[in-house]
């Protein structure tokens, strides 16, 4: 059964800390894995990963996909209070263009 | 397993017709459901918040007469795209809020193609 699992469910860190968020999946006909940041309304797109081992980077955020382990991590270095949000992982299937979302990791960064 | 389902997963229709998309929460009751539309480069736009037993709250710029939302039960919300046009072709995703767990579960999405 197709599913996406994120861990931890929630995380509280201090400003300046580095965090690693995990996403593991069991999805047939894998096409891509996407990371989103959800603060208020709609999730904001962060990264799309299709190839294993290639790190994508945007400022203090980076992500990498491991197709062998069926997982991905999202790293945030030097966290700021503005990083507080729910981080969602979604896996897209080749067939039918369907998405499977995880339930997200709630990150709280305290000053 | 999936806790939120969408039906259909894919639909092709002619311009001018109406299309109904269903969003169901399978294992919990959801007084609140959300409808999103996916735009290029994978960003999601919140279209409306659907509340059971009351009118949906639409985001600015979303035509409520074009995108009709009905949340008639605690497990079902429907989005009807009325008089669909090719520019309505997109990927529509719903999510349901499990207020007890304070968790939002997303559906797998519906691909709409208007010819």
Image: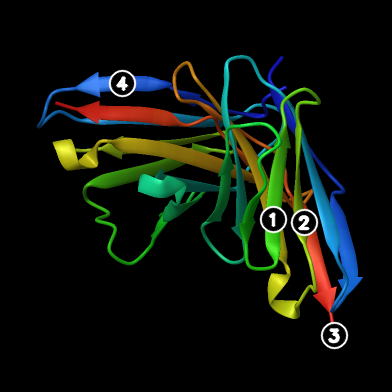
C-alpha gap between disc 2 and disc 4: 37 Å
Nearer the N terminus, badge 3 or badge 2?
Answer: 2
Q: Which is nearer the eye, B66 or B55?
A: B66
C-alpha gap between disc 3 and disc 1: 22 Å
Is residue B112 at all visible to an observer of this figure? Answer: yes
Residue under pointer 1: A62
Q: Chain of mark 4?
A: B
Q: Are marks 3 and 1 in contact (CB under 8 Å)?
A: no
Q: Nearer the viewer, mark 3 or mark 1?
A: 1
Residue B85: percent from left, percent from top: 14, 37
Q: Which mark is residue B11?
A: 4
C-alpha gap between disc 3 and disc 2: 19 Å
Task: Say above or below: A1 vs B104.
Answer: above
Q: For numbered disc 4, what is the local secondary structure?
A: strand
Q: For numbered disc 1, what is the local secondary structure?
A: strand
Q: Are marks 2 and 1 in contact (CB under 8 Å)?
A: yes
Q: Are marks 4 and 3 in contact (CB under 8 Å)?
A: no
Nearer the N terminus, badge 2 or badge 1?
Answer: 1
Q: Chain of mark 1?
A: A
Is the residue marked by circle 4 packed among few (<14), some (14-19), or many (20+) residues within 10 Å?
Answer: some
C-alpha gap between disc 1 and disc 4: 36 Å
Q: Quadrant of residue A13?
A: bottom right
Q: Are marks 3 and 2 in contact (CB under 8 Å)?
A: no
Residue under pointer 3: A111
């Amino acid at each position: 059964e197709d599913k996406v699992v994120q861990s931890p469910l929630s995380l509280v860190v201090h400003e300046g800390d580095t965090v690693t968020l995990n996403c593991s999946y069991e999805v047939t006909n894998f096409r891509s894995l996407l990371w989103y940041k959800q603060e208020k309304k709609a999730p904001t797109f962060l990264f799309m990963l299709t190839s294993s081992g290639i790190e994508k980077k945007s400022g203090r955020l980076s992500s990498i996909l491991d197709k062998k382990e069926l997982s991905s991590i999202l790293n945030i270095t030097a966290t700021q209070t503005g990083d507080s949000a729910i981080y969602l992982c979604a896996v897209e299937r080749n067939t039918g263009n369907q998405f499977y979302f995880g339930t997200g990791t709630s990150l709280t960064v305290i000053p | 397993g999936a806790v939120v389902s969408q039906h259909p997963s894919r639909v092709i229709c002619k311009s001018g017709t109406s299309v109904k998309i269903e969003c169901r929460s399978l294992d919990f009751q959801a007084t609140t459901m959300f409808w999103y539309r996916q735009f290029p480069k994978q960003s999601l736009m919140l279209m409306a918040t659907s509340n059971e037993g009351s009118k949906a709250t639409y985001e600015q710029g979303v035509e409520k007469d074009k995108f009709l939302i009905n949340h008639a039960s605690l497990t079902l919300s429907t989005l009807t795209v009325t008089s669909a046009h090719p520019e309505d072709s997109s990927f529509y995703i719903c999510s349901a809020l499990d207020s007890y767990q304070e968790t939002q579960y997303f559906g797998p999405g519906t691909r709409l193609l208007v010819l």
